[in-house]
Image (cartoon, rainbow, N blue to C red):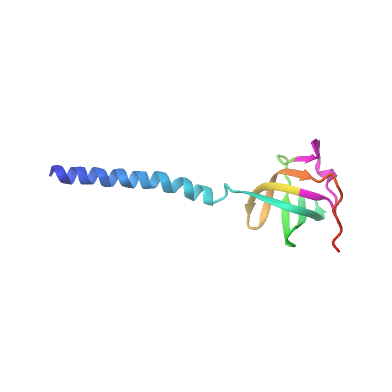
Amino acid sequence: MYTKAIMRRSLIAGLALAAVLIVPAAVLAHGAHVHKVVGTVSTIDGNHVMVKTTDGKTVMVMLNAKTKITQGKVKADAAALKAGSRLVAQGTEDKGIVTATVVQIGTAPAVAAR
């Protein structure tokens, strides 16, 4: 009887440890990952910015009231974004759309593709 009680406690402790280790990994795999978009603004429609990435894909970047925008080291607003502007945006991704928390606008004009 004593051995069964020890085995039961060990099993419960092992399951509890497994749960503690698995739950944070599952949470990190869903939504907590920050995505980075690097490219050139192709179009802007309100708070939707379409960015052509350096690998040729097009990604929608959403701006909101919490998005911090800078150009160089100076704070900027969304009006500073223009088609052709280079940018780096960081934020959470959901269904292929990145909601930006930070946008850095390039200070030099984009180089034309040859």
Q: Which residues are magenta?
A: 69-87
Number of labelled discs?
0
Does 54 appear in magenta? no
Quadrant in the picture for residue 53 = bottom right
Horizontal and vertical percent position of residue 60: 72, 55
Quadrant in the picture for residue 3 = top left
Residue ranking furthest to the bottom:
114
Asked if 112 appears above or below 86 in the picture, the reply is below
Residue ranking furthest to the left:
1
Residue at x 81%, y 53% (from the top left corner): 44
Residue at x 76%, y 55% (from the top left corner): 51
Q: Quadrant of the N terminus?
A: top left
Horizontal and vertical percent position of residue 80: 84, 44
Residue at x 23%, y 46% (from the top left corner): 8
Closest to the observer, 56 or 65: 56
Closest to the observer, 24 or 94: 24
Horizontal and vertical percent position of residue 103: 74, 44
Q: Is residue 11 left or right of residue 5?
A: right
Q: Quadrant of the C terminus?
A: bottom right
Residue ranking furthest to the front:
114
Q: Is residue 83 left or right of residue 97?
A: right
Q: Is residue 102 left or right of residue 24?
A: right
Residue ranking furthest to the top:
74
Does 76 appear in magenta? yes
Horizontal and vertical percent position of residue 62: 72, 50
